[in-house]
Image (cartoon, rainbow, N blue to C red):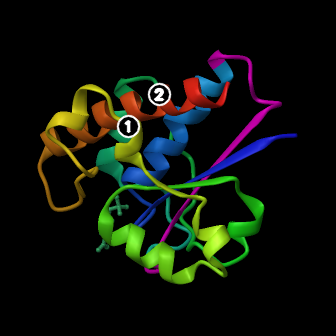
């Protein structure tokens, strides 16, 4: 059966669509498209329908990721449709946890930092790059590449 991962951040225009694009790239490279499905969503609906932020799209494109996701808000149904819901920070965790239909389904929520190795020492979350400079986007991509690689290893 296909394992499905949903990445979640606040706006679904910076961190989670980048994680989505990176994971899809890694899954394709591993030849695991038939076994692993990937999507992303935001806790906030204000960017619904939008492509990822142009700064994130540019930074991701320089690393070979083409981000084409259209933003959407997470909904209760996602707890039934996905096996793992991976959030970027504690604020996302609280919002997603509140939405969980049951305690059992809330066990599907993970934090991206659970999959950090080298970043684990200094970071307990993936910082929101929205109000940051260009370095913020590069740092987020570095973190997401590490987290996604480790998460995929665990799932294969
Ligand atoms: P994201 O970044 O959660 O990584 O997509 C943000 C995007 C938009 C906003 C906040 C964070 N916003 O407040 O509009």
Foreground disc of the pair 2, 1: 2
Q: Is residue 77 visible?
A: yes
Which quarter of the figure is the C terminus placed in? top right
Foreground residue, 49 or 141?
A: 141
Q: Residue furthest right?
A: 1
Foreground residue, 105 or 149?
A: 105
**Residue pictured at 39% horizontal, 43% vertical:** 114
The answer to whether residue 69 is left or right of residue 118 is right
- Secondary structure of residue under mark 2: helix
Magenta residues?
Answer: 29-46
Residue 85, image x, y percentages = 57, 57
The answer to whether residue 156 is left or right of residue 88 is right
- Mark 2 highlights which residue? 150
**Residue pictured at 14% horizontal, 39% vertical:** 122
Indicate which disc, 2 or 1, sits on the residue closer to the N terminus.
1
State which quadrant residue 49 falls in.
bottom right
Q: Is residue 65 visible?
A: no
Q: Is residue 83 above or below residue 143?
A: below
């Amino acid at each position: 059966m296909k394992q499905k991962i949903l990445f979640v951040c606040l706006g679904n225009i910076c961190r989670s669509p980048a994680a989505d694009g990176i994971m899809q790239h890694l899954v394709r490279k591993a030849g695991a498209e038939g076994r692993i499905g990937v999507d992303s969503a935001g806790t906030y609906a204000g960017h619904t329908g939008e492509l990822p932020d142009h700064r994130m799209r540019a930074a991701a494109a320089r690393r070979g990721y083409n981000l084409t996701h259209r933003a959407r808000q997470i909904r209760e149904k996602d707890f039934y449709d996905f096996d793992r819901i991976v959030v970027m920070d504690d604020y996302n965790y609280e919002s997603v946890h509140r939405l969980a239909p049951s305690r059992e389904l809330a066990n599907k929520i993970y934090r991206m930092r659970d999959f950090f190795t080298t970043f684990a020492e200094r970071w307990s979350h993936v910082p929101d790059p929205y109000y940051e400079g260009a370095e913020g986007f590069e740092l987020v991509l570095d973190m997401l590449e590490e987290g996604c690689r480790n998460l995929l290893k665990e799932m294969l």
